[in-house]
Image (cartoon, helix red, strand yellow):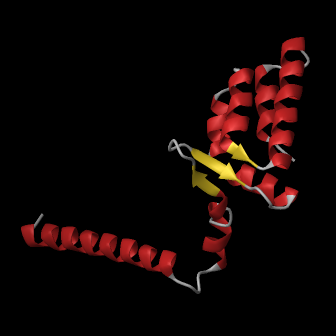
Amino acid sequence: MDKSLMIFIAVGIGFLYFITSFIGDIQEDDNLQNSEYKEKHKYDAYQTVDSIGQEILDVTGADVSVQVAAWNASILKTDFLMLFPDFSEMKVFVNERVRGKALQKRLSNSVNDAEDKYFSGVMNAEQAKRALGTLK
């Protein structure tokens, strides 16, 4: 291929990358954001960092349905599920990294229920993990 064509394509790809990242940054700072962006980042205000640098979910004072929805949308949920089958570590995780009495209680009850059913043989590992992942 011709060198000038390759240079033209490389410059075009660089320009396209610059424009898309620039527009993305503008969209994040825009006061009149689209509804899709707002829906995706609806619960970001509840995620914070504690005094030792760990990410926590602080839903204190929010409605119970908001607390559950924020948990289901949180990245902490993935970290929580990775602790399976260490139920004691999951309980510590809930107590240390989740703020909000109603959500803590629901998560603790969910962990206790899954632990009882898992160790009694009523649930297998996949069912227990699915039960822990679906908080209602």
Report the front residue among 117 and 108: 108
Placement of 87 over or under 35, stated as above or below: above
Q: Position of residue 6 (x, y in %)?
A: 15, 67
Q: Is residue 35 visible?
A: yes
Q: Residue furthest top?
A: 120
Q: Is residue 82 left or right of residue 63?
A: left
Residue 78 appears left or right of 61: left
Q: How many marks?
A: 0
Residue 10 versus residue 60: which sits nearer the camera?
60
Name the spot of residue 111 as percent of width and height, x first: 81, 30
Depth order, front residue of 16/128: 128
Does the image show residue 123?
Answer: no
Q: Is residue 65 above or below residue 130?
A: below
- Name above or below for residue 51 compared with residue 40: above
Between 90 and 95, the residue placed more toward the observer is 95
The residue positioned 25% from the left and 70% from the top of the image is 14
Q: Quadrant of the N terminus?
A: bottom left
The residue depicted at 69 percent of the width and 20 percent of the height is: 86
Q: Quadrant of residue 15?
A: bottom left
